[in-house]
Amino acid sequence: MPWLFCYGSNHPAQLAERLGRGDWDLRSGRLDDYWRVFRGYSQRWGGGVASLAPKPGQSVYGYVARVSAPDLALMDKYEGVAGGAYERMMVQVETPSGDVSAVAYVSTSRERAAPTRAYLEAVSKTIGAFWRGSGGGPVKWSDVTVR
């Protein structure tokens, strides 16, 4: 079964809602030598949405979920793969039990767009489910660097 790397608004509760289940293995995950960028425009969020871009020395924090091939097919629909909004990319994610190869959804847009505060709050909720924020406290929307 494949792993899915979630680093944007796909909080475990949203993932469970989208896939109609929540019985998978979840682990904190860190993707090294990339950073989180905001690209394209989401009608739902009213601004840019998270994507990944290579950046040596940087890291993207999130989590991995063990999903099935049918789960990924359903996620393709939510991520707009058929319409060209996002595409799948394989990445190596560090977890507490070792590196895993995971699917990450990345924007096909090269247009940088500022995210809304509501979207940054969703991203901070995703990160905060597995990681601590600046100063060791909860992750806040202001902890999410906008690039």
Image (cartoon, rainbow, N blue to C red):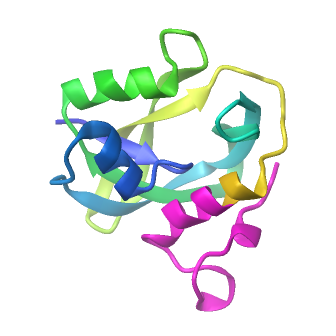
Give above or below for 38 relative to 65: above
| Above/below status of 134 relative to 92 | below
Q: Quadrant of the N terminus?
A: top left
Q: Which residue is rendered at x = 43% and y = 71% of the image?
A: 130
- x, y (%) of residue 25? 20, 56
Query: Which x, y percent locates residue 27?
Result: 31, 62
Return the residue nearer the eye: 4 or 59.
Answer: 4
Q: Position of residue 131 (x, y in %)?
A: 49, 74
Q: Position of residue 8 (x, y in %)?
A: 56, 49
Q: Is residue 100 visible?
A: no
Quadrant of residue 110 within the rendered picture: top right
Count of numbered circles on the image:
0
* Position of 8 relative to 43 (above/below): below
Q: Is residue 133 magenta?
A: yes
Residue drawn 61% across the image and 19% down it: 85
Compared across the picture, whether 114 is left or right of 104 comes to right
24 and 56: which is toward the camera: 24
> Quick check: 51 above or below 100?
above
Please state which of residues 69 and 17 is positioned toward the viewer in this rendering.
17
Looking at the rendering, the stretch of residues picked out in magenta corresponds to 121-147
Tell me which residue sits at (42%, 45%) in the image: 5
Q: Which of the 4 image quarters holds residue 134?
A: bottom right
Is residue 130 inside the magenta stretch?
Answer: yes
Q: Is residue 35 visible?
A: yes
